Amino acid sequence: MTRDRSFGEVLKAVFPLLDGDDLTSCMVVSRQWRDIAKDEYFWKCICAKRWPSICKRPPPTLSYHKLYQTFSKPAPPQPLLPPQISFEDLEFYIDLWSEQQLIFSEAISGPNLQNGIKNRPRDISEIITAHLDDPDYKMIMQVEPSFTIPLGQHITVSVLAARRDTNKMACILNKALNNDNIMDVFGIEIDFCDAASSEDEVLWLLDMLDWK
């Protein structure tokens, strides 16, 4: 009995030095280890290191052990439900102005906006070539004939979308920008960057637009 008590005192001295993962592992060694390791003091210290702000105001209901178990690891990604719309339901209206002159205007069906670039110019840069060859999902289409935007021109881009299933429209982009380079345009791409990297993710974002 005295030996168990002494060993318990050793564990109480060692456990505060462990991180949360190691202390969690200790809880499955034996009943004695579990009973000592579940002491809220140890978990309060661990949580205070992970989230110092909780020292300013204690969390409302969760124990510190439960707090660590619940929030210390990133949540696994949840699979998306099937989107409520499809590209067959969508029409995109793309207009580009250079200064006050309209240089591109087209109504494009959803499927056509995924056709990609089939006839690439021979003199495109390695960066653009690498982007086009990247297997990531893209909403991109060929522009024929291609056109050039002169250096220093003020560019305005408007992209509207229409839904055939609801007869509503939404604005995707309405932006003005300065062109610091000569731009030879042979394709149009709608890119949601890191917000969407698959067809389903893009459709979910489009479904969340302010349709009117």
Image (spheres, helix red, strand yellow):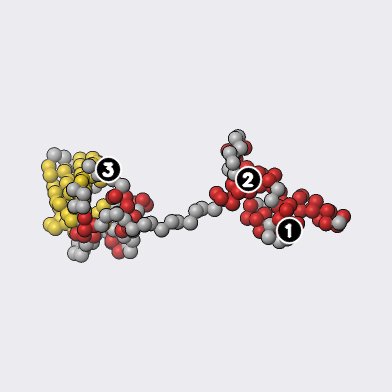
Q: Which residue is mark 2?
A: 64
**SS type, badge 3:** loop
Q: Quadrant of the N terminus?
A: bottom right
Q: Amino acid at mark 3?
A: Asp
Q: x and y percent of residue 8 in the render?
A: 79, 53
Q: Which mark is residue 185?
A: none
Q: Position of residue 56 (x, y in %)?
A: 60, 34
Q: Residue at x 70, y 48 (%)?
A: 39
98, 152: nearer the viewer: 98
Label 2 vs label 1, nearer the camera: 1
Mark 2, other Cα within 10 Å: few <14 / some 14–19 / many ≥20: many
- Quadrant containing the C terminus is top left
Left or right of 88 on screen, residue 191: right
For badge 2, the amino acid type reads Tyr
Q: Nearer the viewer, residue 210 or 202?
A: 210
Sequence-first disc among 3 and 1:
1
Marked residue nearer the N-terminal end (2 or 1): 1
Q: Secondary structure at mark 1?
A: helix
- Lower position in the chain sequence, tag 2 or tag 3: 2
- Of the residues shown, which amino acid type is indicated by label 1? Arg
- Residue named by callout 3: 210
**What x and y, as percent, mark residue 16?**
71, 48
Q: Which mark is residue 31?
A: 1
Q: Is residue 35 left or right of residue 136?
A: right
* Marks 2 and 1 in Cβ contact (< 8 Å): no
